[in-house]
């Protein structure tokens, strides 16, 4: 009788413990999946935003626009030869 | 007495009655068999045929779905974006599901901003199918209201669209992609394999409504496309575009091309063709999308004389100061006549280039074997692909020297009877500036190939000095000059060839190197069919070079190598006066040109 108890009890305990662990890891897996898809969505949104900002930057940084702003709004121009001072080494 | 049902009694041993033991045995045998069948079946399903059943099950709810990936970015040499892929949403529907709720079509069409008839027609045309695109490439902002309706059978898919921030400025070089993100033209096509990403795949469990319930496994991760860093400099590209555009309008020309090369590496810093198109909205005719600077060949005219002179100097029979007699300005040759624009009298070999004399070039050419002239031109890359790998690139024509008669040889010596692209021309001049080493052209930053010696470094240096006189006070291209820098270059004007002869229409060409003391940039440009009243390379093409380089050298921080000129110009002469002076000098230098329309290098009369 004793030997039965000796083998059976640990097995029973083992079964219960692993069963709980299965449930536990299953739950953990679900939580991680939820987290993963949330992060993926966030990543996609950031990518979209990044692309938009890149385009915006490129549009604002267009050489023709810089040139126009410099000439029309900031009244910049190339120096005439009289305004250039050449330094001899 | 009738039989009376005896009241139930407990059976007694020995009595006839139900055989309990027998029944028990039958029952246990029966149960035993049933149990065995169950276990056997379970074993069969679990052990022997488990894979089959697993597959059957998976097929009902496990789906492999694609993870879309973006095409790599194209940047210029400083990392500025030239082509970007941004995510967009494409709305698609399963007509079978959608048609179960026909009353929602109106809502759907309104959200898609499409006419109801069109949506209906498209869906009904594929009523028995499971897939139809409703609208492709919406921005996430546009697609959101559509998906918010939650109409059964309407889905969205992530796709990527290409944007070109520079628009038409770099359109020909970059090319474009089709709606499926595959390169169709230009570098998008040439480097398609490098740019495309590998879409990933993942296995998921979907419920009956197609919602993802669980991620099973990642089959393969999505590999985004790689970034391509071009040798193009965005600022230079813009400068060339701006000045060519100006020249195109001023001269009412039909088209123009320009290429700027890095002399030492053969990297293409700018390549512009006009008229251009907007690669973000493809509605132009395909012909306007050709990258003429590499796909269209033309007869370059006088710019070839630099290589005729190089060949002559290489023979050792002439020196830069050897005298050539060009009087009286025309020269009978076989049944033809070679003409200069006027009688230049006696010229040195250097003067040949300064004044662009056809007669002197012819005399030099006739003095050397056909094979030698051909060999030198070939070493400078004429009749050979540039090495850029651009789709549809042309090599031009340089015919075999065995077939050249005196007339062919004479015409080739001043740039007719052979053809070249603008890129090849820029490359050949870059070789002069690179100590005689010809470099293969490349569009990739840091992608310089192995160069090959075209001419001796000393000879290249001499030639460079001779070409500098062209932009000097006696030269034909003073307008290519840049204040503070020494410029070497050569003009060309050629008549356009048509079937059976040459038109009274022209091509103005300029090819040059700057700064001449230690050349860093080579530029060749071609303006096609300028106003016939004024078509000389010196007046049409050379100023473009001067204006582009004036800004380019400042932007690129190249120190002036002609400080004396700045010093001389600066204190005494105010800007306006300085301009007047140069204009006067020019009108003195080219007085006869405007009087005689059929001038500069004109093909031999009656040639071909």
Image (tube, coloured by chain):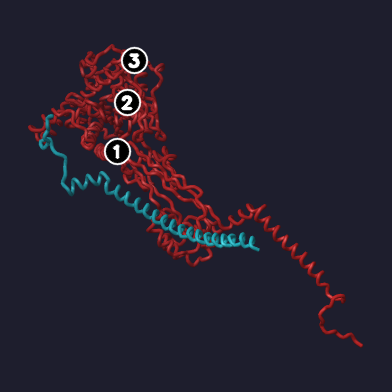
Chain colours: A cyan, B red
Q: Residue drawn at (46%, 60%), measured in percent from left and top?
A: A31
Q: Secondary structure at mark 3?
A: loop
Marks 3,2: beta carbons within 8 A: no
Which tag is nearer the camera, tag 3 or tag 2?
A: 2
Q: Quadrant of residue B57?
A: bottom right
Q: Is residue B448 left or right of residue B553?
A: right
Q: Is residue B337 visible?
A: no
Circle 3 marks a residue in which chain? Answer: B
Q: Earlier in the sequence, mark 3 or mark 1?
A: 1
Residue furthest right as drawn: B1
Q: Which mark is residue B428?
A: 2
Inter-mark Cα distance, 3 to 1: 49 Å
Q: Is residue B350 visible?
A: yes
Q: Which mark is residue B532?
A: none
- Where residue B70 sits in the image (x, y, percent)? 42, 47
For disc 3, the marked residue is B334
Q: Earlier in the sequence, mark 3 or mark 2?
A: 3
Q: Residues within 10 Å of mark 2 (few under 14, many from 20)?
A: many
Q: Residues within 10 Å of mark 1 (few under 14, many from 20)?
A: many
Q: Residue drawn at (28%, 20%), measured in percent from left and top?
A: B457
- Where residue B379 sits in the image (x, y, percent)? 36, 21
For disc 1, the marked residue is B233
Residue furthest bottom as drawn: B1
- Where residue B598 sits in the image (x, y, percent)? 26, 26
Inter-mark Cα distance, 1 to 2: 21 Å
């Amino acid at each position: 009788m004793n030997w039965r108890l000796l083998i059976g009890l640990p097995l029973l305990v083992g079964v219960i413990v692993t069963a709980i662990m299965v449930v536990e890891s299953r739950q953990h897996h679900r939580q991680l999946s939820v987290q993963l898809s949330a992060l993926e969505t966030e990543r996609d949104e950031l990518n979209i935003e990044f692309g938009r900002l890149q385009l915006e930057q490129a549009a604002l940084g267009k050489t023709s626009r810089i040139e126009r702003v410099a000439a029309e709004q900031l009244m910049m121009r190339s120096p005439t030869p009289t305004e250039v001072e050449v330094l001899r080494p | 007495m009738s039989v009376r049902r005896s009241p139930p009694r407990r059976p007694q041993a020995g009595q006839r009655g139900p055989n309990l033991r027998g029944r028990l045995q039958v029952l246990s045998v029966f149960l035993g068999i049933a149990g065995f069948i169950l276990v056997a079946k379970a074993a069969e399903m679990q052990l022997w045929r488990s894979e089959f059943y697993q597959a059957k099950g998976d097929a009902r709810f496990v789906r492999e779905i694609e993870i879309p990936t973006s095409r790599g970015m194209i940047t210029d040499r400083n990392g500025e974006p030239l082509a970007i892929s941004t995510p967009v949403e494409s709305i698609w529907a399963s007509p079978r599901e959608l048609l179960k709720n026909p009353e929602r079509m109106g809502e759907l069409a309104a959200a898609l901003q499409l006419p109801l008839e069109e949506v209906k027609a498209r869906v009904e045309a594929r009523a028995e199918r499971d897939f139809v695109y409703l609208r492709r490439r919406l921005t996430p902002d546009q697609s959101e209201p559509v998906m918010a309706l939650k109409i059964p059978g309407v889905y969205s898919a992530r796709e990527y669209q290409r944007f070109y921030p520079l628009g038409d400025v770099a359109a020909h070089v970059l090319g474009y992609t089709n709606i499926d993100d595959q390169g169709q033209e230009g570098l998008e096509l040439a480097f398609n394999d490098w740019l495309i990403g590998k879409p990933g795949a993942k296995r998921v469990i979907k419920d009956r409504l197609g919602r993802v319930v669980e991620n099973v496994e990642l089959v393969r991760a999505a590999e985004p496309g790689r970034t391509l860093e071009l040798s193009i400099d965005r600022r230079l590209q813009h400068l060339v575009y701006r000045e060519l555009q100006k020249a195109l309008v001023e001269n009412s020309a039909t088209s123009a091309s320009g290429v700027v090369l890095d002399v030492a590496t053969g990297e293409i810093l700018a390549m512009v063709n006009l008229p251009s198109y907007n690669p973000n909205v493809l509605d132009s005719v395909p012909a306007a999308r050709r990258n003429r600077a590499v796909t269209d060949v033309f007869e370059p005219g006088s710019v070839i004389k630099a290589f005729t002179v190089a060949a002559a100097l290489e023979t050792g029979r002439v020196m830069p100061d050897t005298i050539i007699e060009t009087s009286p300005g025309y020269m009978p040759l076989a049944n033809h006549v070679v003409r200069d624009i006027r009688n230049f009298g006696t010229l040195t070999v250097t003067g040949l280039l300064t004044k662009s004399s056809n007669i002197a070039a012819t005399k030099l050419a006739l003095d050397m074997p056909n094979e030698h002239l051909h060999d030198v031109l070939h070493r400078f890359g004429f009749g050979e692909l540039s090495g850029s790998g651009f789709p549809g690139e042309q090599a031009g024509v340089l015919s075999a020297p065995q077939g050249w008669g005196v007339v062919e040889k004479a015409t080739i010596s001043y740039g007719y009877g052979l053809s070249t692209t603008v890129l090849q021309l820029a490359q050949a001049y870059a070789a002069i500036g690179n100590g005689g080493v010809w470099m293969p052209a490349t569009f990739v930053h840091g992608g310089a190939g192995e160069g090959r010696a075209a001419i001796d470094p000393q000879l290249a240096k001499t030639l460079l000095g001779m070409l500098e006189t062209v932009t000097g006070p006696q030269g034909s291209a003073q307008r290519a000059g840049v204040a503070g820098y020494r410029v070497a270059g050569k003009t060309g004007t050629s008549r356009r060839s048509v079937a059976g002869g040459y038109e009274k229409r022209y091509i103005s060409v300029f090819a040059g190197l700057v700064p001449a003391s230690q050349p860093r940039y080579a530029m060749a440009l071609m303006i096609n069919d300028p106003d016939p009243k004024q078509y000389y390379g010196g007046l049409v093409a050379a100023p473009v070079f001067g204006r582009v380089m004036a800004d380019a050298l400042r932007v690129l921080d190249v120190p002036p190598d002609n400080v004396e000129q700045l010093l001389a110009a600066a204190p005494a002469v105010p800007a306006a006066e300085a301009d007047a002076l140069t204009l006067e000098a020019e009108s003195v230098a080219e007085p006869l040109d405007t009087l005689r329309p059929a001038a500069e290098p004109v093909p031999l009369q009656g040639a071909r």
